[in-house]
Image (tube, rainbow, N blue to C red):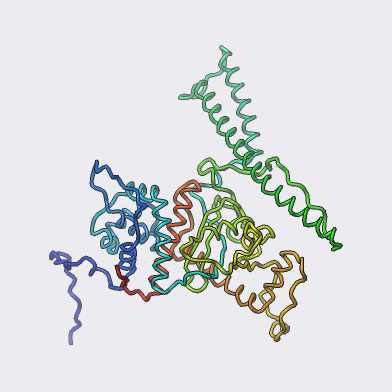
Amino acid sequence: MAARFVCIDRDTPLLLPPDMRDWVPANHLVHFILDAVDVLDLRQVQVNTRGTGDKQYPPRMLLAALIYSYATGVFGSRRIESSTYDSVPMRVLTADTHPDHDTLCTFRRKNQALLTESFVGVLQLAQQLKLLKFGQLTVAADGTKVQANASKHSAVSYARAGKMMEQLELEVQQLLAKAEAADSAPLREGLTIPEEITRRQERQAALARARAEIEARAHARYAAKLAEHKEKLAERAAKKESGQRVGGQEPKAPNPEPEAKDQYNFTDPESRIMKAGNGNHFEQSYNAQAAVEVESRLIVGQCVSVAPNDKQELEPTLNSIPPEAGDVSAVLVDSGYFSERAVRQVEENPEGGSTGTKVYAAVEKTGHHRSVADLEIRSEPEAPPPGASVKEVMSHRLRTSEGKALYKLRQQTVEPIFGIIKSVLGFRQFHLRGREKVSLEWTLVGLAYNLKRLHRLSGGLKLALGT
């Protein structure tokens, strides 16, 4: 019997299906996102209410296009525009229309409130689908460094800026002297002394602004560290009064002056040089924070920090969880978040009462290897005595059976989320600049991840929600 092949005919015009949604499978992500966006409240959207100019693209379509693009690893507005031509799911989503990159970029940039509201709406959708419980949440929080839309080579240190200003001033004086000398050697073709002087003076002014910004940051850092220094002194004094042994050297007072290595980036001034990867190299980055619910593994809160470490990020990250998600009963963090001040801010209200939230933070280094002693059944450790420090209470909390079981969830909850965002979605660098716009983009990343996660948890089925 002769071999048979499917007929591939590219010349005969095709009779397309009457419903564009038939172009992709029924369980495709694009259907799920369209259904989800249809039930979101878009009261916060920014549109041209005057009715002037060209017709506008519907906000729901633009929002769905951004979410689907970020969920499938397409981030730049020009690439999103291109996908409306060469991606079948995007053609379905946009109904074969093609919003240009400027429209997409402007919509994304001007709708921070809409994206925040939509993030909350997706969490409420997850509750409606019984995929996220309401209240008494256990969340794992962590941060990851995401590269800024700027090169670290566009940065200058405080010390280097000072030396460059001195060099530029010397060159300006040399050029002025050259202009006064009638027999001075001429400059190369296309160069003039006034233009060269102006160029150097403008560079001097930019460096002066950079040094002023670094000095302002140093002053803010000093104020924060001074408060911590006073707390440490007060804690040591209290221990001495109670007769407890106080070890270690007296804590040093912070320095209000900028450090020579403090840097300023001319492309994105709000970004910072931070350790990246395994800590062996530095990148111009932001510190992106996320709080993940341990059962559903949905992101319930996110924010962006310019701090190179997580020491001050516990409270802001928990405050980013919207009230609609309910109360947080336990939060799991690594040792980088721990400080007595941070724990008290989360566990105690201004009146000194309990907030109902417990922090589980590592305060001691532990190896991954389990010894024979670790395999043996042990009795619960004795509770710390009254007046014990926050560190002692935390150490006891993590040695209890409940604390051990909870803390095991941290590593398997939040760290894989960052792996998915960076390796699966491919989001390793922000495409906007400035902390406000970067925060907007991080919200969009969380929104896209959550809808992709809901699509997976629901088995790829279309949403069947009542109106």
Left or right, 289 with reference to 279:
left
Residue 359, image x and y in percent? 63, 66
Vertical placement of residue 53 versus 414, above or below = above
Which residue is found at the position 46% from the left and 59% from the top?
A: 427
Frontmost residue, 465 versus 386: 386
Of 421 and 122, the residue lying toward us: 122
Q: Residue at x 66, y 44 (%)?
A: 261
> Residue 40 is drawn in which quadrant?
bottom left
Vertical placement of 452 versus 428: above or below?
Answer: below
**Of 40 and 71, which appears nearest the observer?**
40
Total marks shown come to 0
Quadrant containing the C terminus is: bottom left
| x and y percentages locating residue 337 in the rendered image | 63, 61
The one of 71 and 313 positioned closer to us in this rendering: 313
Left or right: 213 as drawn, with respect to 455: right
Point out residue 281 in the picture as x, y percentages from the top left corner.
Answer: 61, 55
Image height check: is 156 above or below 327?
above
Query: Residue 159 appears at what percent x and percent y?
Result: 66, 38
Residue at position x 52%, y 22% from top? 187
Question: In the figure, residue 237 lies in which quadrant?
Answer: bottom right
Q: Quadrant of the N terminus?
A: bottom left
Give the residue at the far top of this rendering: 182
Q: Give the quarter of the image for residue 215.
A: top right
The vertical placement of 179 against 91, above or below, is above
